[in-house]
Amino acid sequence: MTPIHYGARAFSARSARPALSALAALLRKAIRQLTVPLAVALAIALTLAAGSGAARASTVHVAIDTAGFGAASGYLDMQLSASAGVPLATAAVTNMTGFGALDLNYGWTAVAGGFQFRNDTSNYLSHTAVFGGVLSFDLTFDGAYDPLTSYVSHFVVSAFDDSFAPLGAYNPVSLALADFSWTPARTASGAGSIGMAVSDPGVAVVPEPASLLLLGAGLAAMALSLRRRA
């Protein structure tokens, strides 16, 4: 397996959790009142969602507050890690707001409203940007299943000023503001998961509506169970 390394401006990131602590507290409170088997199952799901930063959804919305960058303009760069001979995964960036013109870019294909990257093709995407406000986009992962989980793809985001100096609270080794990982499903009928590791506090990540609907359905089922036990 021959690796295809990151491009000219590379990234990674340290771990951070989505802002769902209030819902996590509510779920834990409800879990204590449920039957033991159900409580254990819910506790495991809660740990995966709130503790590891993983999400069952394939799409997240990313907003980057650039007010603290200390630069008026520069570049916002994106890249999906790639390697030869791995199960295919794709990352699509759409609904982009606040971005300027294309700069250094290669290895992507155009999709409706944005760009798509593949983990079997070396790629890079850079846009010019005026900093001081919020840049945002939707990030959608998809891909083949992999029973062995032999490769986890990483989509990374970084910012640079006009002199190509890194901006924000970036990872000192990789220069990343945020790293989004895609772990493929282990079966054909399963679902992959998105992991989030954020270095800059100005980066906000929220699930798309489908994830919120699943969470709401879970809370409703728990409430019904509690009413029956009352």
Image (spheres, rainbow, N blue to C red):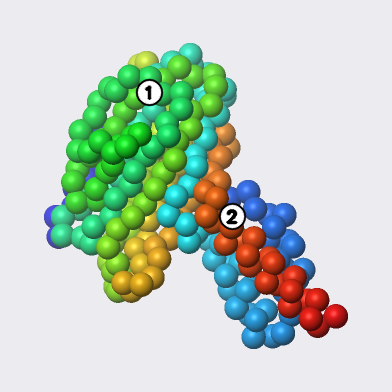
**Figure quadrant of residue 112:** top left
Amino acid type assigned to the residue bearing label 1 in the image? Tyr
Residue beneath disc 1: 75
Q: Is residue 11 visible?
A: no
Q: In the figure, is residue 7 to the left or right of 73? A: left
Q: Position of residue 149 (x, y in %)?
A: 31, 68
Residue beneath disc 2: 212
Amino acid type assigned to the residue bearing label 2 in the image? Leu
Residue ID at (42%, 31%): 96
**Figure quadrant of residue 110:** top left
* Image height of 17 relative to 134, above or below: below
Residue ID at (41%, 20%): 129
Q: Position of residue 159 (x, y in %)?
A: 41, 28
Q: Is residue 201 visible?
A: yes
Q: In the figure, is residue 152 to the left or right of 87? A: right
Residue ID at (44%, 40%): 138
SS at mark 1 in the image: strand
154 or 210: nearer the eye?
210
Q: In the figure, is residue 19 to the left or right of 79? A: right
* Image height of 175 relative to 120, above or below: above
The circle on residue 156 is none
* Image height of 40 relative to 128, above or below: below
Image quarter (top left, top right, bottom left or bottom right) of the N terminus: bottom left
Q: Contact, CB < 8 Å: mark 2 with mark 1?
A: no
Image quarter (top left, top right, bottom left or bottom right) of the C terminus: bottom right
Q: Which mark sits nearer the N-terminus, 2 or 1?
A: 1
Residue ID at (53%, 26%): 134
